[in-house]
Image (cartoon, rainbow, N blue to C red):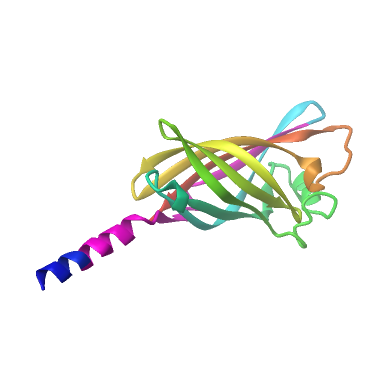
């Protein structure tokens, strides 16, 4: 009897420990921002409405994955006229493509809480492979994930061939995932 109980408990502990922690992205504690040059000047902006699923365990990276989206309609550059234009079909076309999403395909450790992610970024109906480093810092009830990467807006069909707007957009992620 004791042997069967021990084996059952051992199997239960092993199966539970083989899965990464399920986390919920905290929209209120997270910030997704971007910077792009427009007429030679940096324009800052942000998007909100973070949703999705996150699983992370530094000891079980093969079971770790992020699948999150933001609401494209929340784009904010502190200029209502520009924001309204960015929501139209020649830019983000938020009526047709209401979300921007990132889904990881693999995560690898680099050391000192630094990780390397391969992912797919989808916006404006276009999905492209991206890669970026991120830092995962334990916080009360979860993790804080910080990353920075650049994308070429034209590869996603956003904004066409503008002579005044830069092609590269620097994206900053500061995402809190909680249990």
Q: Where is residue 28 in the image (x, y as percent from the top left)?
A: 49, 51
Q: Is residue 12 magenta?
A: yes
Residue in front for this viewpoint, 34 or 60 = 60
**Quarter that holds the C terminus:** bottom left
Residue that protrudes farthest toward the top in the picture: 40
Q: Residue at 36% across / 55% down in the picture?
A: 18
Query: 165 above or below 86?
Result: above
Q: Where is residue 6 in the image (x, y as percent from the top left)?
A: 16, 65
Residue in front for this viewpoint, 131 or 72 = 131
Q: Is residue 152 magenta?
A: no
Q: Position of residue 13 (x, y in %)?
A: 26, 60
Q: Residue at 32% across / 55% down in the picture?
A: 17
Residue that protrudes farthest toward the bottom in the picture: 1
Q: Residue at 82% across / 29% down in the picture?
A: 39
Q: Residue at 60% across / 55% down in the picture?
A: 69
Q: Is residue 122 rendered to the left or right of residue 163?
A: left
Q: What residue span does the magenta drawing correspond to?
A: 8-37
Q: Looking at the image, how many numbered discs can be counted on the residues?
A: 0
Image quarter of residue 46: top right
**Quarter that holds the N terminus:** bottom left
Query: 167 above or below 128?
Result: above
Residue in front for this viewpoint, 113 or 51 = 113
Q: Where is residue 33 in the image (x, y as percent from the top left)?
A: 61, 40
């Amino acid at each position: 009897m004791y042997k069967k109980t021990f084996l059952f408990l051992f199997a239960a502990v092993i199966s539970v420990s083989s899965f990464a922690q399920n986390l919920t992205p905290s929209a209120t504690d997270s910030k997704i921002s971007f910077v792009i040059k427009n007429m030679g000047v940096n324009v800052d902006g942000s998007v909100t409405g973070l949703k999705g699923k996150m699983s992370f365990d530094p000891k079980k990276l093969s079971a770790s994955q992020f699948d999150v989206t933001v609401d494209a309609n929340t784009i904010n550059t502190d200029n209502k006229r520009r924001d309204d234009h960015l929501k139209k079909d020649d830019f983000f076309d938020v009526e047709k493509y209401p979300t921007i999403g990132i889904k990881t395909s693999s995560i690898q450790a680099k050391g000192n809480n630094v990780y390397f992610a391969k992912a797919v970024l989808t916006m404006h109906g276009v999905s492209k492979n991206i890669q970026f480093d991120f830092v995962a810092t334990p916080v009360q009830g979860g993790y804080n994930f910080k990353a920075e990467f650049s994308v070429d807006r034209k590869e996603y069909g956003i904004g066409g061939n503008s002579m005044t707007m830069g092609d590269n957009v620097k994206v900053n992620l500061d995402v809190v995932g909680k249990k």
